[in-house]
Structures are given as structure tokens and as C-alpha cells.
Amino acid sequence: MEEREERGGAVRVGMIWGGIGGVVGLLASLPGSLVGILVAGFIGFSCGRRAAAAGRRAGALSGLIGGAVAAPVYVLGSTIGALLAARLIGAAEIATTLSEVLGTKVSADLAWTYFLFSLVLSAILEAAILVSVSSAAGAWANRE
């Protein structure tokens, strides 16, 4: 019973910070996915410290649980923000910019495919950063 309550504290903190992170991720990713990747570290740090304080379980494990619960919501919000920004810019403009950077002709469909692929990579990176920083912050909070 006691183990269930300890895990419930970390899960509850993860749900709260997942919701906060989802909104922050959506807003932060409007300028681009790189900002969402940077903000994931801050959300993970806050989530991990609070998850470790909420549970009596080892700090790193509480941070890991909180980060694992928060990461999907954060990634979803961040991806939606980046998609909204890309829809505003348009596939033709993305293709033009990509053509200038690469020095070759890129169609709008191919540019959109590249953009979606970059969103998948960004989401994986954001989730990994959020969970690892959350776990590290939980362990660090336990040391103090």
C-alpha cells in the first residue's frame, strides 16, 4: 500500500508537469522545434525535483516515473506547436528555403516529408531529454 502511494505522488507530479509542459511545449515550439528541445530540459528538471519531493521512493526513480508520465504530453504539445507554425509558413515556402540551403530543387511534397521526419526526430530527442533530465534532477534532489 505504501509503495502505491509513493508511486502515486510521482505519477501525479508527472501528470501535472505533463499538462504544464504540453502547453509550454506548444507555445515554445511555435518558433521552431529547437526551442522545444531546449525547453524540454527545463520541464524535465522541474518535474524531476518535484516528483522526488512528492514521493518517499529513491529520487532518481521518482524523477524517472514523473518524466515518463510527463514526456508524451510534452512531446504532443511541442509537435502540435511546430505543425501549426509550419502550416502558417506553408510547404511552398519551406521548399523554397530548403532549395536555397541545399542548392538543389526541392518540391513542396518532399519538403513537407522532410519536415515531418524532422518532427519525429525532434519528438524522440525531446522525450529522451525530458526523461533523463527529470531522472537526474530527482537523484540530485535526493542528495541535498
Image (cartoon, grey):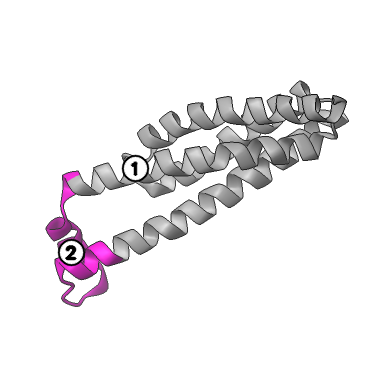
Kind of residue at badge 1: Ile
Give the structural element (helix, strand or loop) at label 2.
helix
What is the crowding at mark 2: few (fewer than 14 residues within 10 Å), some, or many (at least 20)?
Answer: many
What residue is drawn where x is 66% and y is 42%?
133
- The residue that mark 1 highlights is 80
The reply to whether the magenta stretch includes residue 70 is: no
Query: Which is nearer the N-term, disc 2 or disc 1?
Result: 1
What residue is drawn where x is 34% and y is 46%?
32
The extreme bottom residue here reads 104
Residue 49 seen in the current view: no
In which image quadrant can residue 144 be found? top right
Give the image location of residue 15, x and y in percent: 58, 29
Is residue 72 left or right of 50 when viewed as pictured? left
- The residue that mark 2 highlights is 95
Give the image location of residue 11, x and y in percent: 67, 31
Query: Does 8 appear above or below 88?
Result: above
Quarter of the picture containing the N terminus is top right
